[in-house]
């Protein structure tokens, strides 16, 4: 069975996760992998862009590099980036065949979509000097955490995925931070409690932990400033870039602005038309960052939300920059009902209507999730 058909039989989401399954199955084939140093990226927001800044800079510096990110927007290949480009179908299919030859049929079937694609990516990365490995929704129990880490990087941690990670910032941060390896770098955090938790875990494990806020170099700030009007126009992207530069300096890479030109990961505050911005953020932290970035503007928000997201708070944060909301249809069992979204918008006194098309004389922000981005792009392209 080909890769896409094989993955099509696996559900993307689970109500209950078996945390023992992946480590057990990985241990049966771990000796077959031959990848380089792993940089593990864990956090709530900023994982994709931080990881891509690191991977792109290492690639331009002459290293062989793989970058695993998720989920994808339009094409599965987006998840597996090797030496400057998304993996082609032939590479992915060869890795799939390789895996099926080594896994028992029972284990191959038992693995979740994310678990299987993690192994698939790691096979594609054989021979790489560095692998930038982005965690999924967690840290400690995430499939990516089974691999030996050269460096742990913690991006901003906030409230999200409460059903699996806990209701408080302390619970959520703890499960992410317990993935910490022997070397760790923590980026800007809006919650002071995260720093204290990180230091406690580092002390208990004897890990070396540095905070970007305390150790970022003058060269790092200068590079961010040099790119502030081109590659990284928003404050949150600038913080992600500073974190990536700080990590690269720890790897003894000679950093310069040229390393990051064209390094942006699509879908992260991407300007896809003169009047249309697209961002795959889907939580309160992302909404706060976008509200700050677009302060003073009045945008049409193309939106929808999964039922398990705190869309009322998200919309409340975005309200100062919203002219109206245009709800786009998304084909997903997880999507919230129109009735509940309408009720939330009415309670916030935000005008809304169905999305039809973008008008040339208005500014648009497409936001809500990877699924919202996909639905919009497929309609926009057609």
Image: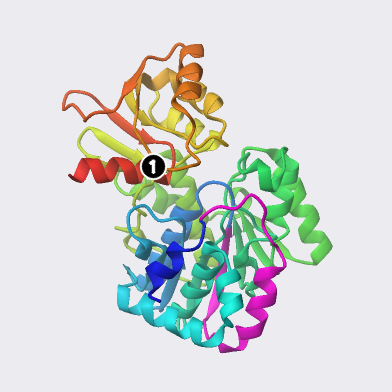
- Does the magenta run of residues contain 303? no
* Residue 52 visible somewhere in the drawing: yes
> Image check: 86 left or right of 183?
left
What residue sits 34% from the left and 46% below the top?
374
Q: Nearer the viewer, residue 104 or 266?
A: 104
> Percent from the top left, x then y, of residue 296?
36, 20
* Residue 220 visible somewhere in the drawing: no
Callout 1 crowding tier (Cα within 10 Å): few <14, some 14–19, many ≥20: few
> Image check: 201 left or right of 22?
right
Give, as a single range, the part of the protein colored magenta: 12-41
> Image check: 345 left or right of 299?
right
Residue underneath mark 1: 331
What residue sits 55% from the left and 87% below the top?
102
Vertical side of 175 occupied by 364: above or below: above
Q: Nearer the viewer, residue 326 or 139?
A: 326
> Percent from the top left, x then y, of residue 334?
50, 41
What residue sits 67% from the left and 43% below the top?
163
> Image check: 341 left or right of 275?
right
């Amino acid at each position: 069975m080909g890769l896409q058909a094989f993955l099509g039989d696996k559900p993307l989401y689970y109500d209950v996760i078996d945390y023992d399954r992946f480590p057990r199955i990985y241990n049966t084939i771990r000796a077959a992998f031959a990848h380089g140093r792993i940089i593990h990226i864990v956090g709530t927001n900023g994982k994709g862009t931080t990881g891509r800044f690191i991977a792109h800079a290492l690639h331009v510096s002459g290293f062989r590099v793989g970058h695993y990110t998720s989920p994808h927007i339009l094409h599965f290949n987006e998840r597996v980036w090797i030496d400057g480009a998304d993996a082609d179908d032939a590479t992915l299919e060869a890795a799939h065949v390789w895996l099926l030859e080594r896994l028992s049929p029972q284990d191959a079937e038992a693995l979740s979509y994310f678990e299987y694609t993690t192994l698939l990516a790691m096979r594609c990365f054989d021979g790489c000097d560095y692998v930038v490995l982005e965690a999924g929704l967690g840290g400690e129990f995430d499939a990516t955490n089974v691999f030996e880490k050269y460096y742990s990087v913690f991006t901003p941690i906030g409230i999200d995925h409460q059903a699996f990670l806990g209701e408080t910032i302390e619970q959520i941060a703890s499960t992410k931070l317990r993935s910490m390896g022997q070397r760790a770098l923590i980026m800007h955090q809006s919650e002071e409690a995260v720093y204290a938790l990180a230091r406690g875990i580092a002390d208990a494990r004897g890990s070396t932990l540095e905070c970007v806020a305390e150790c970022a170099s003058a060269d790092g700030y200068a590079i961010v400033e040099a790119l502030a009007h081109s590659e990284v126009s928003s404050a949150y992207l600038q913080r992600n870039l500073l974190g990536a530069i700080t990590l690269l300096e720890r790897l003894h890479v000679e950093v310069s602005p040229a390393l990051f030109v064209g390094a942006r990961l699509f879908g992260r505050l991407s300007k896809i038309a003169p009047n249309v911005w697209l961002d795959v953020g889907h939580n309160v932290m992302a909404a706060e960052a976008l509200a700050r970035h677009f302060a003073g503007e009045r945008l049409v928000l193309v939106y929808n939300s999964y039922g398990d997201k705190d869309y009322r708070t998200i919309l409340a944060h975005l309200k100062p920059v919203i002219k109206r909301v245009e709800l786009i249809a998304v084909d997903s069992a997880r999507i919230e009902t129109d009735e509940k979204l309408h009720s939330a918008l009415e309670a916030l006194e935000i005008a809304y209507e169905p999305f039809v098309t973008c008008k040339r004389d208005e500014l648009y922000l497409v936001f809500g999730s990877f699924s919202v981005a996909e639905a919009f792009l497929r309609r926009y392209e057609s």
